[in-house]
Image (cartoon, rainbow, N blue to C red):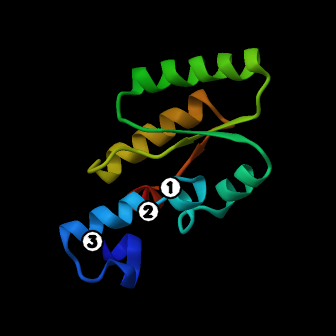
Amino acid sequence: MRWIWGSLAFPFTDSKEEDLWKEQTWTVEFLVEQIDTEILQWARDGEYICFYGGEDKDWIKQFIDAMKSVKTESQKRIKMVYVGKRNSKEFQLKETIAEIKKVDQSGTCFDVKKIRFF
């Protein structure tokens, strides 16, 4: 709670956390404000931003291919950002990021340190 809300989280109770989440508006700024300022610029520029994660390399390749098709057919400016998977080991994340970069050189991946914050 302290990490997300800072001093607003005091007193650190379940009901206080529930109230804070009810008041929060989910925006790109809220998701990545302290993690990656480039993504905030994309949002300001009108880009569509697709966050995705996981460790299943086959699924990720299929997803990237599908999103490339959506991007082409819709003619929308779409940026894809790989955000990992909670509790992944560092070596797994590095392997997955390397595979993504082979398949989608224009995609963006949070580095291992940033993934932990997401």
Name the residue type under label 3: Lys
Q: On the picture, is 11 further left or further right than 45?
A: left
Q: Do residues under tags 1 and 2 come within 8 Å of each other at their CB atoms?
A: no
Disc tally is 3
Horizontal and vertical percent position of residue 57: 40, 27
| Other residues around mark 1 within 10 Å, as few (<14) / some (14–19) / many (≥20) | some
Q: Which mark sits nearer the N-terminus, 1 or 2?
A: 2
Left or right: where 82 falls relative to 108: left
Query: Which of labels 1 and 2 is toward the front?
Result: 2
> Which mark is on residue 111?
1
> Residue at horizontal 39%, vertical 74%?
5
Q: Amino acid under label 1?
A: Asp
**In the rendered image, which quarter contains the C terminus?**
bottom left
Q: Is residue 85 left or right of residue 34?
A: left
Mark 2 nearby-residue class (10 Å; few <14, some 14–19, many ≥20): few
Disc 2 marks a residue whose amino acid type is Glu
Sequence-first disc among 2 and 3: 3
Res 44 → quadrant:
bottom right
Residue 10 percent location from the top left of the image: 29, 83
Q: How far separated are the C-alphas under marks 1 and 3? A: 32 Å
Gap in Å between the C-alphas at discs 2 and 3?
Answer: 11 Å
Which SS class for mark 3? helix
Labelled disc at residue 16: 3
The residue wearing badge 2 is 23
